[in-house]
Image (cartoon, grey):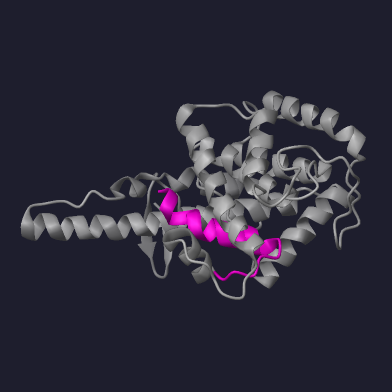
Amino acid sequence: MEEVYRVEWTFNSNAIEGNTLTLLETKLVLEQGLTIGGKKLREHFEVINHAEAIAYIQELIDQGHELTEFVVKSIQHLVLKNIADDAGRYRMVNVRISGSEHVPSHYTLVPEQMEQLIQWYESQRNIMHPLLLAAEFHYRFVYIHPFSDGSGRTARLLMNLILMQYGYPPAIVKAADAARLRYYETLGEASVQGQLQPFMELIIECVAELFAVLFVCGEIVHLINVILTLYFGVQWRFFEEIRLYKLSRLFSFLAVLFPDTLLSNLIRYTRKNMLSRRGQHWLSH
Protein backbone atom coordinates (compact mmCIF):
# COMPACT_ATOMS: atom_id res chain seq x y z
CA MET A 1 0.00 0.00 0.00
CA GLU A 2 3.04 2.26 0.39
CA GLU A 3 3.11 3.04 -3.34
CA VAL A 4 -0.42 4.44 -3.10
CA TYR A 5 0.70 7.41 -1.03
CA ARG A 6 4.53 7.61 -1.25
CA VAL A 7 4.75 10.07 -4.14
CA GLU A 8 1.88 12.31 -3.04
CA TRP A 9 3.03 12.38 0.57
CA THR A 10 6.59 13.24 -0.46
CA PHE A 11 5.48 15.92 -2.91
CA ASN A 12 3.12 17.68 -0.53
CA SER A 13 5.36 17.58 2.54
CA ASN A 14 8.31 18.99 0.60
CA ALA A 15 6.20 21.57 -1.24
CA ILE A 16 4.87 22.90 2.08
CA GLU A 17 8.49 23.72 2.94
CA GLY A 18 9.18 25.43 -0.38
CA ASN A 19 10.39 22.62 -2.68
CA THR A 20 9.47 23.60 -6.27
CA LEU A 21 9.40 20.13 -7.86
CA THR A 22 5.93 19.34 -9.19
CA LEU A 23 4.03 16.15 -8.42
CA LEU A 24 5.03 14.69 -11.80
CA GLU A 25 8.66 15.72 -11.34
CA THR A 26 8.65 14.17 -7.87
CA LYS A 27 7.33 10.94 -9.37
CA LEU A 28 10.03 10.94 -12.06
CA VAL A 29 12.80 11.51 -9.51
CA LEU A 30 11.54 8.69 -7.28
CA GLU A 31 10.56 6.09 -9.86
CA GLN A 32 13.00 6.73 -12.70
CA GLY A 33 15.89 8.43 -10.93
CA LEU A 34 15.78 11.40 -13.27
CA THR A 35 17.38 14.78 -12.64
CA ILE A 36 15.04 17.66 -13.44
CA GLY A 37 16.66 20.49 -15.37
CA GLY A 38 16.60 23.89 -13.73
CA LYS A 39 15.91 22.47 -10.26
CA LYS A 40 18.30 22.62 -7.32
CA LEU A 41 20.26 19.56 -6.23
CA ARG A 42 18.91 20.09 -2.70
CA GLU A 43 15.35 19.69 -3.99
CA HIS A 44 16.23 16.32 -5.52
CA PHE A 45 17.80 15.19 -2.24
CA GLU A 46 14.68 16.31 -0.36
CA VAL A 47 12.54 14.03 -2.54
CA ILE A 48 14.84 11.02 -2.27
CA ASN A 49 15.39 11.52 1.46
CA HIS A 50 11.70 11.83 2.27
CA ALA A 51 10.90 8.61 0.41
CA GLU A 52 13.67 6.86 2.36
CA ALA A 53 12.17 8.20 5.59
CA ILE A 54 8.77 6.74 4.63
CA ALA A 55 10.42 3.37 3.97
CA TYR A 56 12.13 3.59 7.37
CA ILE A 57 8.80 4.30 9.05
CA GLN A 58 7.25 1.27 7.37
CA GLU A 59 10.20 -0.83 8.55
CA LEU A 60 9.70 0.41 12.13
CA ILE A 61 6.03 -0.56 11.96
CA ASP A 62 6.71 -3.98 10.44
CA GLN A 63 9.30 -4.76 13.13
CA GLY A 64 7.20 -3.40 15.99
CA HIS A 65 9.65 -0.72 17.13
CA GLU A 66 8.49 1.94 19.58
CA LEU A 67 8.73 5.71 19.12
CA THR A 68 11.87 6.95 20.89
CA GLU A 69 14.22 9.92 20.70
CA PHE A 70 16.55 7.73 18.65
CA VAL A 71 13.75 7.20 16.12
CA VAL A 72 13.04 10.94 16.06
CA LYS A 73 16.68 11.77 15.33
CA SER A 74 16.99 8.96 12.79
CA ILE A 75 14.01 10.22 10.81
CA GLN A 76 15.30 13.79 10.78
CA HIS A 77 18.73 12.52 9.75
CA LEU A 78 17.17 10.81 6.74
CA VAL A 79 15.20 13.95 5.87
CA LEU A 80 18.36 16.11 5.76
CA LYS A 81 20.92 13.53 4.63
CA ASN A 82 23.41 15.11 2.17
CA ILE A 83 21.81 18.50 2.89
CA ALA A 84 22.75 19.64 6.42
CA ASP A 85 25.86 18.96 8.50
CA ASP A 86 23.84 18.77 11.73
CA ALA A 87 21.35 16.20 10.44
CA GLY A 88 20.15 13.96 13.25
CA ARG A 89 21.17 16.37 16.03
CA TYR A 90 19.07 18.78 18.06
CA ARG A 91 19.67 22.41 17.20
CA MET A 92 22.38 24.44 18.91
CA VAL A 93 20.94 27.81 17.90
CA ASN A 94 17.69 29.68 18.49
CA VAL A 95 15.25 29.80 15.57
CA ARG A 96 12.21 31.77 14.47
CA ILE A 97 9.33 30.47 12.36
CA SER A 98 8.63 32.76 9.42
CA GLY A 99 5.16 34.32 9.62
CA SER A 100 4.41 32.90 13.07
CA GLU A 101 3.98 34.71 16.38
CA HIS A 102 5.19 31.63 18.23
CA VAL A 103 8.81 31.66 19.36
CA PRO A 104 10.22 28.10 19.72
CA SER A 105 12.02 27.00 22.86
CA HIS A 106 15.52 28.21 23.64
CA TYR A 107 17.96 25.69 22.22
CA THR A 108 19.33 24.83 25.66
CA LEU A 109 15.87 23.54 26.67
CA VAL A 110 15.37 21.30 23.62
CA PRO A 111 16.93 18.05 24.98
CA GLU A 112 14.89 18.19 28.19
CA GLN A 113 11.67 19.09 26.38
CA MET A 114 12.12 16.30 23.84
CA GLU A 115 12.62 13.82 26.66
CA GLN A 116 9.41 15.13 28.21
CA LEU A 117 7.59 14.84 24.89
CA ILE A 118 8.43 11.15 24.57
CA GLN A 119 7.37 10.62 28.19
CA TRP A 120 4.07 12.38 27.45
CA TYR A 121 3.55 10.15 24.42
CA GLU A 122 4.20 7.00 26.45
CA SER A 123 1.74 8.14 29.14
CA GLN A 124 -1.02 8.94 26.63
CA ARG A 125 -0.66 6.26 23.94
CA ASN A 126 -3.09 3.87 25.63
CA ILE A 127 -5.48 6.62 26.74
CA MET A 128 -6.01 9.04 23.84
CA HIS A 129 -7.65 8.13 20.55
CA PRO A 130 -4.87 7.50 17.97
CA LEU A 131 -6.03 10.37 15.75
CA LEU A 132 -5.91 12.84 18.62
CA LEU A 133 -2.64 11.40 19.90
CA ALA A 134 -0.93 11.78 16.51
CA ALA A 135 -2.23 15.30 15.92
CA GLU A 136 -1.26 16.53 19.38
CA PHE A 137 2.18 14.94 19.12
CA HIS A 138 2.71 16.87 15.87
CA TYR A 139 1.67 20.11 17.57
CA ARG A 140 3.86 19.55 20.63
CA PHE A 141 6.82 18.64 18.41
CA VAL A 142 6.69 21.77 16.26
CA TYR A 143 6.08 23.88 19.37
CA ILE A 144 9.55 22.79 20.53
CA HIS A 145 10.95 22.90 16.96
CA PRO A 146 13.90 20.71 17.98
CA PHE A 147 15.94 20.91 14.77
CA SER A 148 17.46 23.85 12.95
CA ASP A 149 15.94 22.54 9.71
CA GLY A 150 13.49 19.80 8.78
CA SER A 151 11.31 20.01 11.91
CA GLY A 152 8.10 20.36 9.87
CA ARG A 153 8.72 17.35 7.63
CA THR A 154 9.90 15.32 10.60
CA ALA A 155 6.78 16.28 12.57
CA ARG A 156 4.51 15.07 9.76
CA LEU A 157 6.48 11.83 9.40
CA LEU A 158 6.27 11.15 13.14
CA MET A 159 2.56 11.95 13.19
CA ASN A 160 2.00 9.42 10.42
CA LEU A 161 4.21 6.85 12.11
CA ILE A 162 1.81 7.00 15.06
CA LEU A 163 -1.26 6.81 12.82
CA MET A 164 0.08 3.89 10.79
CA GLN A 165 1.07 1.99 13.94
CA TYR A 166 -2.63 1.98 14.82
CA GLY A 167 -3.72 0.87 11.35
CA TYR A 168 -4.71 4.27 9.95
CA PRO A 169 -3.45 5.65 6.64
CA PRO A 170 -1.14 8.68 6.78
CA ALA A 171 -2.52 12.19 7.04
CA ILE A 172 -1.26 13.89 3.89
CA VAL A 173 -1.43 17.65 4.46
CA LYS A 174 -1.85 19.25 1.04
CA ALA A 175 0.52 21.94 -0.20
CA ALA A 176 -2.06 23.85 -2.25
CA ASP A 177 -2.19 27.49 -1.18
CA ALA A 178 -5.50 27.32 0.75
CA ALA A 179 -4.65 24.01 2.40
CA ARG A 180 -1.15 25.15 3.37
CA LEU A 181 -2.54 28.39 4.79
CA ARG A 182 -5.07 26.49 6.88
CA TYR A 183 -2.33 24.16 8.12
CA TYR A 184 -0.17 27.05 9.31
CA GLU A 185 -3.12 29.02 10.70
CA THR A 186 -4.42 26.11 12.77
CA LEU A 187 -0.92 25.40 14.07
CA GLY A 188 -0.66 29.08 14.97
CA GLU A 189 -3.96 28.96 16.83
CA ALA A 190 -2.72 25.97 18.80
CA SER A 191 0.70 27.46 19.57
CA VAL A 192 -0.33 31.02 20.38
CA GLN A 193 -3.93 30.73 21.60
CA GLY A 194 -3.95 27.16 22.90
CA GLN A 195 -6.83 26.26 20.56
CA LEU A 196 -5.90 22.76 19.41
CA GLN A 197 -9.24 21.53 18.02
CA PRO A 198 -9.02 23.29 14.59
CA PHE A 199 -5.67 21.63 13.94
CA MET A 200 -6.98 18.25 15.09
CA GLU A 201 -9.98 18.63 12.80
CA LEU A 202 -7.68 19.33 9.85
CA ILE A 203 -5.56 16.25 10.49
CA ILE A 204 -8.63 14.04 10.88
CA GLU A 205 -10.00 15.32 7.58
CA CYS A 206 -6.69 14.45 5.91
CA VAL A 207 -6.91 10.89 7.25
CA ALA A 208 -10.56 10.58 6.25
CA GLU A 209 -9.75 11.72 2.71
CA LEU A 210 -7.19 8.97 2.14
CA PHE A 211 -9.43 6.44 3.89
CA ALA A 212 -12.14 7.23 1.33
CA VAL A 213 -9.72 6.96 -1.60
CA LEU A 214 -8.47 3.58 -0.40
CA PHE A 215 -12.02 2.34 0.05
CA VAL A 216 -13.12 3.41 -3.42
CA CYS A 217 -9.98 1.81 -4.92
CA GLY A 218 -10.82 -1.35 -3.04
CA GLU A 219 -14.38 -1.33 -4.36
CA ILE A 220 -13.11 -0.96 -7.94
CA VAL A 221 -10.75 -3.91 -7.44
CA HIS A 222 -13.61 -5.91 -5.94
CA LEU A 223 -15.80 -5.16 -8.98
CA ILE A 224 -13.01 -6.31 -11.31
CA ASN A 225 -12.74 -9.51 -9.27
CA VAL A 226 -16.47 -10.12 -9.58
CA ILE A 227 -16.26 -9.75 -13.36
CA LEU A 228 -13.17 -11.97 -13.62
CA THR A 229 -14.77 -14.61 -11.42
CA LEU A 230 -18.04 -14.65 -13.38
CA TYR A 231 -16.48 -14.76 -16.84
CA PHE A 232 -13.10 -16.40 -16.33
CA GLY A 233 -13.27 -18.16 -12.99
CA VAL A 234 -10.20 -16.32 -11.66
CA GLN A 235 -9.57 -13.55 -9.17
CA TRP A 236 -7.18 -10.59 -9.12
CA ARG A 237 -6.15 -10.30 -5.48
CA PHE A 238 -3.89 -7.23 -5.79
CA PHE A 239 -5.01 -4.70 -3.14
CA GLU A 240 -8.14 -6.73 -2.45
CA GLU A 241 -7.49 -6.27 1.27
CA ILE A 242 -7.96 -2.50 0.92
CA ARG A 243 -11.74 -2.87 0.81
CA LEU A 244 -11.69 -4.42 4.29
CA TYR A 245 -10.96 -1.06 5.92
CA LYS A 246 -13.66 -0.34 8.46
CA LEU A 247 -14.33 3.34 7.82
CA SER A 248 -17.22 3.54 10.23
CA ARG A 249 -14.84 3.57 13.24
CA LEU A 250 -13.29 6.74 11.85
CA PHE A 251 -16.56 8.39 10.82
CA SER A 252 -18.28 7.50 14.09
CA PHE A 253 -15.42 9.11 15.97
CA LEU A 254 -15.73 12.24 13.82
CA ALA A 255 -19.44 12.48 14.63
CA VAL A 256 -18.74 12.43 18.35
CA LEU A 257 -15.83 14.87 18.22
CA PHE A 258 -17.25 17.33 15.68
CA PRO A 259 -21.07 17.06 15.82
CA ASP A 260 -21.63 20.25 13.83
CA THR A 261 -19.52 19.39 10.80
CA LEU A 262 -20.77 18.18 7.44
CA LEU A 263 -19.33 14.74 8.08
CA SER A 264 -21.69 14.28 11.01
CA ASN A 265 -24.60 14.29 8.55
CA LEU A 266 -23.13 11.20 6.91
CA ILE A 267 -22.83 9.43 10.24
CA ARG A 268 -26.59 9.42 10.73
CA TYR A 269 -26.76 6.75 8.05
CA THR A 270 -24.31 4.47 9.84
CA ARG A 271 -25.73 1.03 10.57
CA LYS A 272 -22.93 -1.45 9.82
CA ASN A 273 -19.19 -1.52 9.30
CA MET A 274 -18.95 -0.91 5.53
CA LEU A 275 -19.91 1.88 3.14
CA SER A 276 -22.36 1.82 0.26
CA ARG A 277 -23.26 4.18 -2.57
CA ARG A 278 -26.04 6.70 -1.91
CA GLY A 279 -26.39 9.25 -4.68
CA GLN A 280 -22.97 10.80 -5.14
CA HIS A 281 -21.73 9.86 -1.67
CA TRP A 282 -20.30 6.80 0.07
CA LEU A 283 -22.21 6.15 3.28
CA SER A 284 -22.02 3.61 6.07
CA HIS A 285 -25.11 1.45 6.36
Q: Residue at x 74, y 66 (%)?
A: 181
Residue nearer the viewer, 245 or 237: 237
Circle count: 0
Q: Residue at x 85, y 47 (%)?
A: 194
Residue nearer the viewer, 216 or 89: 89
In the image, residue 146 lies at what x, y percent? 80, 41
In the image, residue 284 lies at what x, y percent? 42, 52
Residue nearer the viewer, 239 or 273: 239
Residue nearer the viewer, 159 or 51: 51
Q: Which residues are magenta?
A: 1-22
Is residue 262 at all visible to an observer of this figure? no
In the image, residue 237 lies at what x, y percent? 23, 48
Is residue 99 at all visible to an observer of this figure? yes
Does residue 2 sit above or below 173 in this rendering? Answer: above
Residue 63 covered by magenta stretch: no
Residue 18 covered by magenta stretch: yes
Q: Residue at x 85, y 56 (%)?
A: 97
Does residue 245 sit above or below 18 in this rendering? Answer: above
Looking at the image, residue 148 sits to the left or right of residue 73; the answer is right
The image quadrant that residue 20 belongs to is bottom right
Looking at the image, residue 262 sits to the left or right of residue 190; the answer is left
Does residue 233 sit above or below 281 in this rendering? Answer: above
Does residue 41 sit above or below 5 in this rendering? Answer: below
Q: Residue at x 89, y 39 (%)?
A: 107
In the image, residue 83 lies at what x, y percent? 69, 52
Q: Main secondary structure of the magenta part?
A: helix
Looking at the image, residue 97 sits to the left or right of residue 30; the answer is right
Instruction: Pick out the residue farthest to the bottom.
Output: 38
